[in-house]
Image (spheres, grey):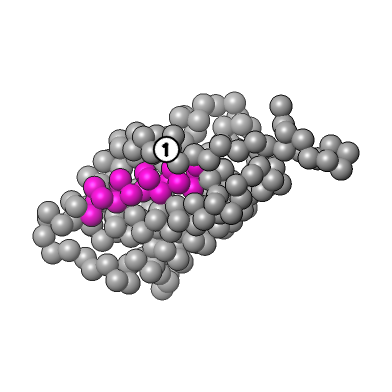
Amino acid sequence: MTPAQQLRSGHLPSRLVQLAVGLWLFGTAIAMFVRSGLGLAPWDVLHNGLQHFFSVSFGTVMIVVGALVLLLWVPLRQWPGVGTVANIFVIGIAADVTLLWLPEPAGLAPRWALLVGGIVLNGFAGALYIGSQLGPGPRDGLMTGFAHQTGWSIRLVRTLIEVTVLAIGWLLGGVVGIGTLLFAVCIGPVTQFFLPMVTVRVEPRVETGGAVAPVV
């Protein structure tokens, strides 16, 4: 769906609430990964690595990187939706807010609890904002746009992108650990588990001579 069709597809107020909740919980889950100290998701390894070179918060790095990634949509002829723009700001703000009140645990068991809980929460939150059908995040849009332009599979493009950002982040000093591997293995199945439960059924519509008609 185009951004306009996303907004005209019904249930907009509840979808906006679902989007906001999903994005906020997504940022909370990322903060849980950070505090666990057991490894970060590939993009967050990059964010963590970049943070070592700038006197800004983790969430601020996420926002700046998200905005730069969105610029890469231009040559890929991708159009951002409301959810795309909100993704850039809300997740970074939520991560910073959570990091302010969530202390770093002292023992290994609490660290594992944060890591596992973060993966489950991340999968649920991702399903929420994807299921709102208000546009992909900038990083997901980069993946789908690149796949569309090259004809390569989504799986291959995602692997190439995430391996690249992981390697760069690691070289910059980002935290890589068992949590990085666990995230890579588990996040797809966890998100897929929740997605059918929270996906909003919408009916794309287009303008036809002043009237609104369903897309068929």
At a point 72% along the width and 38% down the height, the residue shown is 205
Determine whether, in the image, residue 191 is placed left or right of residue 108.
right
Q: Is residue 53 visible?
A: no
Q: Is residue 113 visible?
A: yes
The residue tagged 1 is 197
In which image quadrant can residue 145 be found? top right
At a point 63% along the width and 32% down the height, the residue shown is 149
Which of 155/194 is in front?
194
How many numbered dots are placed on residues in this image? Answer: 1
Determine whether, in the image, residue 53 is placed left or right of residue 14.
left
Looking at the rendering, in which quadrant would you find the C terminus? Answer: top right
Residue type pointed to by label 1: Met
Determine whether, in the image, residue 37 is placed left or right of residue 213.
left
| Secondary structure category for the residue under label 1 | helix
In which image quadrant can residue 35 be found? bottom left
Which of 182/192 is in front?
192
In which image quadrant can residue 193 be found? top left
Looking at the rendering, in which quadrant would you find the N terminus? Answer: top right
Q: Position of residue 143 (x, y in %)?
A: 53, 39
At a point 72% along the width and 31% down the height, the residue shown is 215
User: Does residue 184 lie above or below 50 as drawn?
Assistant: above
Residue extending farthest right: 209
Determine whether, in the image, residue 108 is placed left or right of residue 128.
left
Q: Residues within 10 Å of mark 1 (few under 14, many from 20)?
A: few
State whether the magenta stretch is mostly helix, strand or loop. helix
Does 1 lie within the magenta span? no
At a point 34% along the width and 66% down the height, the residue shown is 98
Q: Position of residue 79 (x, y in %)?
A: 67, 46
Magenta extent: 114-131
